[in-house]
Image (cartoon, grey):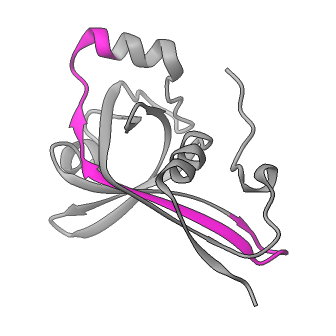
Amino acid sequence: MNASVQLGESECRELLAGGVVGRVAMATPVGPRIVPVNYSVHGDAIVFRTAPYSELSTYGWNADLAFEVDHLDYEAHQGWSVVAIGRAHVVDDPDEVQRIRREWEPRPWAPGSRNLYVMLPWRQLTGVRLGDDWTRRSMMPVRRTV
């Protein structure tokens, strides 16, 4: 039987910082939406880029959002998920945008211009791991280098 383990904040932060793609959940006038985004972590916040007239930029800034990143191993029946909840805002300070670019700029895979930076400082960060025999290496979503 696979064990379910609640993750501590430091483990959640480490897993979140190791990822590249996650999903943003938001409310819109026609119902909830979930949008995949490339992201980076800066301090206690997630940063992603979007197009100025996208659904995400229309309804996702100055709003409460949920963000999820996870990793699943279907063969081993293992997985983990980290969820961050907070209020997003557009990064409009040029110095802050430069700092983000220097530290680790999110690089969207989607085509088109994604020049609007959105920051999601979390007020809640939670996670869960399912399965046995986890190693530090098997838990990391990606091995990325700068």
Residue 103 at x, y percent in the picture: 50, 17
Whether 12 is among the magenta residues is no
121 lies above or below 9 = above
Q: Nearer the viewer, residue 134 or 33?
A: 134
Residue 58 at x, y percent in the picture: 20, 45
- The residue at the far bottom in this view is 1
Whether 77 is among the magenta residues is yes
Quadrant of res 51 = top left
* Residue drawn at point x = 15 percent, y = 65 percent: 29
Q: Nearer the viewer, residue 51 or 142?
A: 142
Answer with left or right where residue 25 lies relative to residue 111: left
Quadrant of res 95 = top left
* Residue drawn at point x = 25 percent, y = 25 percent: 91
Query: How many numbered tags mark residues here?
Result: 0
90 lies above or below 8 = above
Residue 145 at x, y percent in the picture: 71, 25
Q: Nearer the viewer, residue 59 or 140?
A: 140
47 lies above or below 14 = above
* Residue drawn at point x = 72 percent, y = 44 percent: 142
112 lies above or below 84 = above
Q: Nearer the viewer, residue 129 or 50?
A: 129
Q: Which residues are magenta?
A: 72-96
Which quarter shows the N terminus? Answer: bottom right
Residue 94 at x, y percent in the picture: 27, 10
* Residue drawn at point x = 20 percent, y = 43 percent: 61
Answer with left or right where residue 80 lies relative to residue 32: right
Which quarter shows the C terminus? Answer: top right
